[in-house]
Image (cartoon, rainbow, N blue to C red):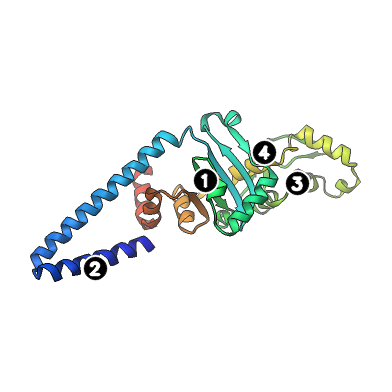
């Protein structure tokens, strides 16, 4: 909205100057159209450069995704190729996440991005509109037994999923939820063995799976326009913010909803 208002003000000033110089209405209108045409052409050229750059570099260049709660970095993943995530993904260490949190507090994104092609930051507020009662498929898979009487739940609520994302030991929270009162009586060595057996002993894998589940549920519920809506609300940060993203941020959401409805109907 800031850029749109700035453009309108500049255009008004431009027309006023043209009228003062020419003293003719028709000449002012002609110069206004000429100025608007030149502006649109230049803008279109830079948008074209952005699109070309994204087409050439986005798929195969390293991209850093940060999940945060307020200004606390909870999870960081570097992805290079989406077609081969196991070989081209890398998790950010906890010490680095602590360092990133300091940069997030002052909105200094350049040191976080470092040499990566692009940086994407998602705040947990993105999921505020998601109902808690919606089930989230267990990211570790179904039918995993904690003991002979207790199977690991197939679904998590949103509130529990967010609690796992915020925790530095989500695997312990999962076992506490499933074992209930039995948890305190089980030796730590046995708990570690259970975590390994269930495949929930890697904090980063748990958090990334939980986030992917939440995101896919929200995408299914709200449609793709929710991404732009949250981007407009600054719950999603893209750095560097290319011109094409700045323009998209200022497009009225109702316009994009109509476009989406047209192509999904």
Quadrant, the N terminus: bottom left
Which residue is more in the foreground, 112 or 1?
Answer: 112
Q: CA distance from mark 1 to mark 4?
A: 20 Å
Q: Mark 1 highlights which residue?
A: 119
Q: Nearer the viewer, mark 1 or mark 3?
A: 1
Quadrant, the C terminus: top left
Residue 100 seen in the figure: yes
Q: Residue at x 79, y 37 (%)?
A: 195
Q: Secondary structure at mark 2?
A: helix
Q: Earlier in the sequence, mark 2 or mark 3?
A: 2
Q: Nearer the viewer, mark 2 or mark 3?
A: 2
Q: Which quadrant of the structure image shows residue 130? A: bottom right
Does residue 212 appear to the left or right of 41 in the view shown?
Answer: right
- x and y percentages locating residue 104 in the rendered image: 59, 55
Which residue is more in the foreground, 102 or 142?
Answer: 102
Q: Mark 2 highlights which residue?
A: 13
Q: Earlier in the sequence, mark 1 or mark 3?
A: 1
Q: Secondary structure at mark 1?
A: strand
Does residue 126 appear to the left or right of 34 in the view shown?
Answer: right
């Amino acid at each position: 909205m800031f850029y749109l208002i700035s453009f309108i003000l500049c255009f008004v000033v431009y027309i006023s100057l043209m009228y003062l110089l020419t003293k003719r209405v028709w000449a002012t209108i002609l110069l206004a159209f000429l100025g608007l045409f030149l502006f649109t052409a230049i803008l279109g050229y830079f948008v074209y450069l952005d699109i070309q750059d994204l087409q050439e570099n986005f798929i195969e260049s390293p991209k850093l995704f940060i999940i945060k709660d307020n200004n606390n970095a909870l999870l960081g993943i570097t992805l290079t190729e989406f077609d081969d995530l196991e070989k081209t993904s890398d998790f950010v260490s906890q010490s680095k996440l602590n360092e990133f949190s300091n940069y997030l507090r002052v909105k200094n994104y350049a040191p976080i991005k470092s040499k990566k092609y692009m940086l994407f930051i998602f705040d947990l507020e993105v999921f505020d509109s998601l109902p808690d009662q919606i089930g989230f498929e267990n990211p570790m898979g179904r039918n995993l037994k904690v003991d002979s009487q207790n199977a690991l739940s197939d679904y998590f609520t949103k509130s529990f999923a967010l609690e796992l994302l915020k925790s530095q030991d989500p695997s312990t929270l999962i076992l506490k939820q499933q074992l209930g009162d039995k948890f305190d009586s089980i030796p730590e060595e046995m708990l570690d063995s259970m975590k390994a057996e269930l495949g929930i002993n890697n904090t980063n894998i748990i958090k990334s799976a939980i986030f992917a589940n939440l995101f896919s549920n929200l995408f299914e519920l709200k449609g793709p326009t929710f991404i732009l809506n949250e981007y407009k609300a600054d719950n999603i940060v893209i750095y560097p913010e290319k011109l094409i993203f700045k323009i998209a941020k200022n497009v009225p959401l109702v316009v994009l909803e109509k476009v989406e409805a047209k192509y999904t109907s």
